[in-house]
Each structure stands twice: as C-alpha cells, then as structure tokens.
Amino acid sequence: VQFAQKEVASKVPAAFCWLDIARSGLGFIPAGSVDLAIAVSVLHYMRTDENRFALTNETADPDIPVTGPSPRSTCRQLASGTATQCSTARAMFRAVRVGGVVWIYHNGSYRGKWDPHRVWGRRYWRCCFEAELRAGAALLEELDEA
C-alpha cells in the first residue's frame, strides 16, 4: 500500500483501495447492474465453509492439523453461509444482469489447500448454486485445472 501511494499515486491520478469482501460483502453493488463479475486468484483466500477451513484450525498455524471433528455444511446449507467462497460468488451472481457472466479463477489454490473441490467436495459449486440451477436461473461450467 505504501509503495502504491508513493510510486503510483504520485505519478498517476489514482486511488488505491483495499476492501475486505468477506467482512463487508458486495451489497454496495446494485443487483443486476453489471455484465461481468470476475474474481481472479482472490476467493481462494476465503474459507470454503463456515464450519471448515482447509482442514486446519483458523486461529493456529495452517500447517498444524485440526484435532477433533471438522464438520462441514450440508449441500443445502452451503448457500446460506457467510464470509465464504460460496457466499461471495453468490453476491457476484446477484450483481450480474440476466445473461451476464460470473467468472472465478482459482489459480492453483496453493497446491489445493483452499480449493473447494479438494477441501469441501467435488459438488461445492453445484451445491452453492443449487437453487439457481434448479430454477434455470444459472448455468454452471467448471473446467479442470490445466
């Protein structure tokens, strides 16, 4: 931030802005107001589930395994979670106009550490958008990592 303020803002009229979308959400963007919402290499820093975070204890060293049970939300519960990859993707979807696109790229997810397919399960995104998929309001395309 300091580098951007000193080296970029002094040469180009710009403002550097950091936003914690997990905490504040995307409610400031009106529903149906954009054609394209993109998240590149950003959602994988967020939890996959309210009750589960990459098989580790959130408050401890991420390389120390969780001791005891690590429950996860059911498929039906996943969409109602907060501060997760799913909830942010759903907020992005809410902001997109009919016919628009939400595109999320995970960028390898640090050897799968925060990849929802590996941490939560293969149906993560299908469960996240289950209601919209059933209603025909969404189409989901998932690509395998290259």
Image (tube, rainbow, N blue to C red):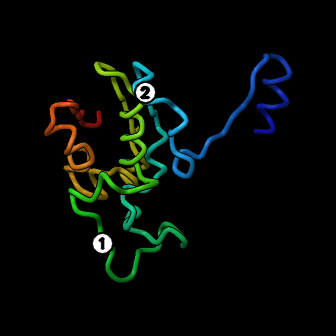
Is the residue under label 2 in contact with that under label 1 (CB below 8 Å)?
no
- Kind of residue at badge 2: Ala
Question: 77 or 113, which is in the foreground?
Answer: 77
Mark 2: which secondary structure? strand
Which comes sooner in the sequence, label 1 or label 2?
A: 2
**Quick one: label 2, few (<14), some, or many (20+) residues within 10 Å?**
some
Task: Please indicate whether residue 107 sits to the left or right of residue 22 in the image.
Answer: left
**Quick one: label 1, few (<14), some, or many (20+) residues within 10 Å?**
few
Image location (x, y in percent) of residue 124: 25, 50
Quarter assignment of residue 78 = bottom left
The residue indicated by pointer 1 is 71
Going 40% across and 76% down the picture, which residue do you hit?
Answer: 66
Going 22% across and 49% down the picture, which residue do you hit?
Answer: 127
Going 48% across and 29% down the picture, which residue do you hit?
Answer: 30
Distance CA(mark 1)–CA(mark 2): 31 Å
Going 46% across and 54% down the picture, which residue do you hit?
Answer: 83
Image location (x, y in percent) of residue 141: 22, 31
Task: Please indicate whether residue 110 sits to the left or right of residue 135 in the image.
Answer: right
- Kind of residue at badge 1: Pro
The quadrant of the picture occupied by the C terminus is top left
The residue indicated by pointer 2 is 37
Question: 98 or 115, which is in the foreground?
Answer: 98
- State whether residue 73 is above or below residue 35: below
Question: 75 or 70, which is in the foreground?
Answer: 75
Residue 109 bears which disc, if any? none
Quarter assignment of residue 106 = top left
Task: Please indicate whether residue 136 sits to the left or right of residue 18 in the image.
Answer: left
Image location (x, y in percent) of residue 120: 28, 58
